[in-house]
């Protein structure tokens, strides 16, 4: 048992923990390369843009630091990418080697992880909404957000980042995206206006407790719009399109479908 613990420490951080006594150093080197190489390859497949920005050498360096420093909260192999996102989010960017000091690293890692997370999500699409045929969500009923449609907000234009575009400062306006999984299990990304993102975000946060009219009235007052009726009308048109696309629907009535 002690030898196994010593081996695990060595594989995570060979610079601080020597090879276990009694083990063939050549075999230990093979184990170490297998562990690190497999992790470099596995995570590289989940974060291709990050790899292309950092380059192979710095990508391996980052994965080695993840292996050394991060303590995962899940034993599931398929959730390593999410753990890696959490690790990148804790990094002190200024403490990284100069070529890696990209202030958008954490947001880019999250953006790339989202696609895999949606592909493997156990969530189900919204049930068919009887009002969908009229393209008009019921104003007097709370709305729900499809669990396979994620409204995301970033400081950086994560969908444009790559070797040819590496900004040093975020733009004045953030990036608002909708990421959704379609019926044929394809993940699609689309840009949102700030209002569209706010609507979807609020519906998701409310958990089926907000009506369309109530939401728009509250947002309009919060933003102090000069023409509240026009704002509500524009918002209703936007929700109408979202409803038709299956992103939002009327939440089921309390007790609906329950046995007597």
Image (cartoon, rainbow, N blue to C red):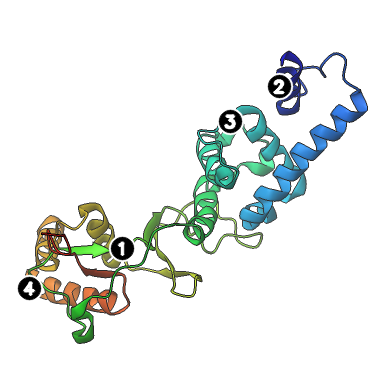
Which one is in front, 236 or 140? Answer: 140
- Residue 165 against residue 101 in the figure, above or below: below
| Disc with the residue nearer the chain's start (2 vs 1) | 2
Could you tell me which secondary element the residue under label 3 belongs to?
loop
Which of pointers 2 and 1 indicates the residue nearer the eye? 2
Q: Mark 2 and mark 1: span between their CA atoms?
A: 45 Å
For residue 97, say whether it is visible: yes
Q: Mark 2 and mark 4: span between their CA atoms?
A: 64 Å
Could you tell me which secondary element the residue under label 1 belongs to?
helix
**Residue at point 44%, 74% (across, down):** 183
Is residue 242 shown left or right of residue 41?
Answer: left
| Disc with the residue nearer the chain's start (1 vs 3) | 3
Please give the label number shown on residue 70: 3
Which of pointers 2 and 4 indicates the residue nearer the eye? 2
> Which residue bears the numbered disc 2?
9
Which one is in front, 136 or 74? Answer: 74
Q: Position of residue 94 (x, y in %)?
A: 58, 34
Could you tell me which secondary element the residue under label 2 belongs to?
helix
């Amino acid at each position: 048992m002690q030898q196994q613990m010593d081996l695990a420490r060595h594989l995570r951080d060979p610079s601080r923990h020597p090879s276990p006594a009694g083990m063939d150093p050549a075999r230990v080197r093979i184990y170490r390369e297998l562990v690190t190489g497999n992790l470099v390859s596995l995570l590289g497949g989940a974060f291709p843009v990050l790899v292309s920005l950092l380059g192979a050498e710095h990508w391996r360096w980052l994965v080695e630091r993840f292996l050394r420093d991060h303590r995962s909260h899940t034993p599931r192999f398929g959730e390593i990418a999410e753990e890696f996102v959490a690790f990148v989010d804790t990094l002190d960017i200024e403490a990284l080697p100069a070529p890696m000091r990209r202030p958008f690293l954490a947001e880019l890692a999250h953006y790339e992880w989202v696609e895999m997370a949606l592909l493997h999500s156990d969530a189900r699409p919204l049930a068919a909404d009887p009002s969908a045929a009229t393209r008009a969500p019921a104003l007097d009923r709370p709305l729900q957000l499809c669990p396979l449609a994620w409204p995301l907000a970033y400081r950086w234009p994560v969908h444009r980042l790559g070797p040819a575009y590496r900004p040093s400062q975020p733009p004045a306006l953030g990036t608002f995206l909708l990421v959704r999984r379609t019926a044929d299990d394809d993940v699609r990304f689309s840009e949102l206006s700030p209002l569209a993102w706010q609507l979807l975000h609020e519906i998701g946060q409310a958990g089926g407790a907000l009506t369309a009219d109530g939401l728009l009235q509250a947002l309009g007052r919060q933003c102090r719009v000069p023409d509240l009726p026009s704002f509500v009308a524009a918002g209703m048109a936007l929700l109408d399109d979202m409803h038709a696309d299956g992103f939002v629907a009327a939440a089921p009535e309390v007790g609906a479908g329950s046995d007597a």
